[in-house]
Each structure stands twice: as structure tokens, then as C-alpha cells.
Amino acid sequence: MIIAQSVHSPAMFRIGELTAVELATQFGTPLYVYDAAVIRRQIANVKRAFARLPLRPFYAMKANANLSILRLIRGEGFGCDAVSPGEIYLAKRAGFESNDIWFTCSNVSDDDLRAIADPGIVINVNSMSEIDRVIALDLPNRIALRVNPDVGAGHHHDVVTAGGGVKFGIDLAELPSARMVIEDSGRRIVGLHAHIGSGIDHIGPLIESARRLLEAAAEFDHLRWINFGGGISVPYRPGEAPFPIDEYGAELTRVAEKLLRARDLHAIIEPGRYIVAQSGTLLARVTAMRVSAGHKWLGVDTGFNHLVRPSKYGAYHHITNCDPQSDRSEDVVVAGNLCESGDVFTRDSEGNVLTRHMERTNVGDLLAFHDAGAYGFSMASHYNARLLPPEILVDGNEARVIRERQELQDLVRGME
Ligand code: LLP
């Protein structure tokens, strides 16, 4: 079984059938470009890997909530995991039906809850306090419980979302009280959910969490879904093994199929990163070069305002020169255009500046920051009054603007 991995050939890097150089020339930089074929490939991987389970695949839209991308994913039959009224608004604009949306709470306000009152949308509550408020507000929504299964994992401690010391989920020991409070109010619990972290590169913790959820399910009579969350990693470094999605599908099937079928339940998984990360590239132009502290520094026309993962988590994004003019390579530091020393794309998780070995690069060259489709644009900001970059969707040999480049006027919206 071949599950394609990112292949970053430095010479004339292409996205779909178009070269990065021609895309940058046509649309300018900085620029997010997504390859629709990669999104479809990842979706096909999910469908194949879990084909034997009664599965309802969802997409965690926090990874990338561009309307065109949401529409593409909805068209492939996915439902949607949303975490704010804004995400629900976007999901509906993209055509998701209420019945295909779960709202996963994280310290939501009464206003948030009122904004999503809808009998179709499942509210996935995160705490006893949210349960009390859903009841007090008399919301018509169906209710699921986000469980903390006491096993967590992730590429960085900030993205581990279960186990001790995290803000998420109802502890296993608290489930009987949660059930009692909800049932006493005359409501039914239609789902159990666990999402244990993000960027998980092996199946062990995911399966352990699934086992604990399935065990907990025995005490709940009216379930329709067990939601095993997202969290599946993708390879970011050249040569890194892809996540064993088929093994995950086979093992989850082995652990869950019997119970799901016996009780006529559906499994949900809600990956975000796995669906979109590899489809996306941030293209940026080298604007400056300097030598300092023994390093060659390349400065680019983007920064952590557009791709925060390296400076926030020390996350690795492979960087290549899209059209190198020399066969030689060199060690460089790649830094952004913001006024902060942490605005460096080549860092570790302690914030140390690292060098990266890459093709020899000059001012004016075009760089590609790979695998930036998840938590790239969706975490972008206007810091330093820099504009958000446009987004382009490439499908084969066609490129379509799916978010326009901003104008200075966008910076004052609501202030005058
Ligand atoms: N479901 C829930 C309830 C979540 O909170 C998340 C992600 C997902 C699903 C999707 O997880 P994924 O399949 O994408 O790993 N900004 C971080 C990632 C934060 C993920 C937060 N929750 C990063 O750039 O690595």
C-alpha cells in the first residue's frame, strides 16, 4: 500500500501541475497555495483505512477553515468538528448540515451556547459546569460528553489534550455524575468523545484511548456515536515515516467493530492536520541576507504572523528554494519580517536558533515552507499590521484565488 509522502524536490517545485515560481509571479508573495489532489488523497486514505468500520468521518476545521477547502471536504462526505460559533457559521456557509456538525466546548460562554442552539448540532460538553448551563439554557441540542481518558500524546506538550494537567474533558471518575445530571434533566447522551492530542505519530495512545472510551460506553444506553477524535500526524521532515493509517484503521476495527455493530453505533474520527497539512505551502520571497554570529541569515517577506508553528512549538517545516540557481548547498537561518527575535522559522522547541542545510539561496529567490496547510493560515494574525496572505487552490493545472490578498483598508475595519 503506497501512502504518498511529501516529496520536496528542490528543482522547480510544483504544486499540482503548476510551478511555485509561476504561482508566485502571478499572485505575488507571501502566498498560501493548496493542492486539492493532496486533500483528496488524504481523504481516500482515511476512507480506505477505516472501510470496515461503521464510520462517519469528520474534519476538524480548526486546521484550515477556508470556505473552498471546507466545501471540498464536505463534498467528500465528511462531517465537521467545530469549536466556536464562528466555526459553525463558516461550516454552514460551506454547506454542512446541522446534523453533520459537532460543537466541542472549551470553556464556552452562555452567549456561545445560545448562538449554536440547534437540535441538529451535537454539543460535546467539556465539563460539569457546561452541562449545567446547557440544561439551564434549555438548549435543544443533543449532548455528547468529551471524556478525558487519562492518556494523552502529541508533538509538543501544548497540544497534548488528555491526561493529567490539561484543561480538557470530563474525568472517567466523573462520568457517572455527568450521566445522572443529564438524564435527570430528561435528556439523552448521544455520544462519547475523546481527543487526546495532536501530531501523534504512533497508534498506541490512540488505541488505548479508544479502549477506555469503549469500556466507558457500557454505562450509556442511548449512544449513537463514539468519537475517537483526531490527532493523526503527518511527516514534516524528509524521510520521516508516514503515520500508519492503515494499521490504525485495522487496529481500531479490531478493538471497536464488534461493540459498534452489536449496539448499532457509528464511530467518528475527526482529523484536521492529516487531511490538509501536506496540501499547503507557504511561498515567500527572500528579501534580505546578513551574516551574524557565524550564521548566514535569510530574511523573508513573511513571519510568524503567517506561520506560527516554528516559533510557537519549535515545529519543523521543511524549507526549499523553489528554483535554485546553484547546485551548491549551505547552512542558513531563515527569519521573518516581524520585529521580534523569535520570528525565526528554524528553531527548536526551547527557542534556540538552528541552522538549516538547504540549497544556496540569494535575495529575490522564492522559498517554499512545506506542509503548511494545517494550523498555518488558521493561526495567522495581523501582528505588526502585516496583511494576511491570499490563499490559492490548485487543482491540476488550474489555480483559483480562494481568499483575496488583503488591503490596508482591512486593517482599520471596525476602528473608524
Ligand atoms: N478534535 C478536537 C476536539 C481538537 O481539539 C483537535 C485539535 C482536533 C480534533 C484535530 O486534531 P488534529 O487531527 O489536527 O491533530 N495548533 C497546533 C495543533 C492544535 C490542535 C488542537 N486541537 C499545531 O499547529 O500543531
Image (cartoon, rainbow, N blue to C red):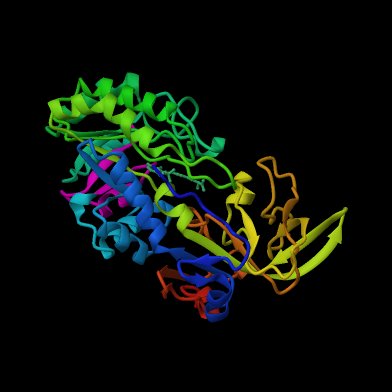
- Residue 90 visible, this orientation: no
Magenta stretch: give its range: 101-127
Nearer-the-camera pick, 41 or 70: 41
Residue 95, quarter of picture: bottom left
Compared with 49, 288 (above or below) is below
Tell me where residue 407 appears, x and y as whole percent.
Answer: 52, 79
Question: Residue placed at 48% from the left, 42% from the top?
Answer: 242
Q: Quadrant of the N terminus?
A: top left
Tell me where residue 92 appears, x and y as whole percent.
Answer: 26, 61
Nearer-the-camera pick, 59 or 98: 59
Question: Residue placed at 52% from the left, 80% from the top?
Answer: 409
> Tag count in the figure?
0
Question: Residue placed at 39% from the left, 51% from the top?
Answer: 275
With 174 as the anchor, is 311 left or right in this view? Answer: right
Tell me where residue 114 appears, x and y as whole percent.
Answer: 26, 51
Residue 402, magenta (yes or no): no
Residue 111, magenta (yes or no): yes
Residue 255, quarter of picture: top left
- Residue 98 visible, this orientation: yes
With 123 as the anchor, is 127 left or right in this view? Answer: right
Tell me where residue 118 appears, x and y as whole percent.
Answer: 18, 51
